[in-house]
Amino acid sequence: MTSTEEIKVLLVDDEPHFVKLLAERLEGRGFNVETAGGGSEAIDKAKEEPYDAIILDLLMPGMDGLETLKQLKEMNPDLQVILLTGHGTIDKGVEAMKLGAMDFVEKPADFKELLEKIKKAKNKRMLLIEKRHEERIKELMKSKSW
């Protein structure tokens, strides 16, 4: 199983207090955590760093979670995004799953459940990367005349 020190997480939420508390709890468990206060900042950070999991609030001012998700997945389809949804936004959570979110968690998030989903995100991302590398190797082998 993956150790938490190897798991890089981006928390995206417009509530600074919530982000700070969740980041501290995850860091206390050994995760490598960065934060973003909104969708645009999250996209900028995701362009610069490979994250194993992105925890994304669905309802944010400006660029909401669905639009952020769309742009993140267009930029990198392998990104594993876990949506945080409040009461009454379950339909949007389902819509987010159709757009490529890995999973969603209802606020207030159960911390143990969130930890498991983050670990699953890391494993899923690694499998996708491995598969892509295998496909590239096969293509390279086909292109060579050895």
Image: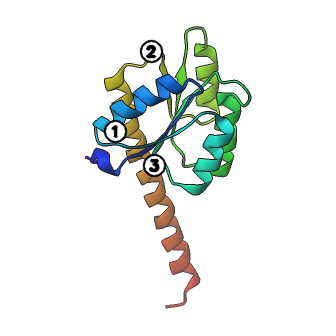
Q: How far apart are the alpha carbons under marks 2 and 1?
A: 19 Å
10 Å crowding of disc 2: few (<14), some (14-19), many (20+): few
10 Å crowding of disc 3: few (<14), some (14-19), many (20+): some
Residue 134 placement (x, y as % from top left): 46, 66
Say what amino acid the circle numbered 1 marks.
Glu
Label 1, on which residue? 27
Q: Looking at the image, is mark 2 or mark 3 earlier in the sequence?
A: 2
Say what amino acid the circle numbered 2 marks.
Pro
Judge by depth and name the residue closer to the eye, 136 or 88: 88
Q: Quadrant of residue 120?
A: top left
Compared across the picture, whether 6 is left or right of 19 comes to left
Helix, strand or loop status at disc 2 = loop
Residue at 35%, 35% in the rendered image: 26
Q: State whether residue 32 is above or below residue 11.
A: below
Label 2, on which residue? 108
Of badges 2 and 1, nearer the viewer stands: 1
Helix, strand or loop status at disc 1 = helix
Helix, strand or loop status at disc 3 = helix
Judge by depth and name the residue closer to the eye, 72 or 8: 8
Say what amino acid the circle numbered 3 marks.
Arg
Compared across the picture, whether 142 is left or right of 131 comes to right
Label 3, on which residue? 125
Of badges 1 and 3, nearer the viewer stands: 1
Q: How far apart are the alpha carbons under marks 2 and 3?
A: 25 Å
Residue at 41%, 26% in the rendered image: 21
Residue at 51%, 61% in the rendered image: 132
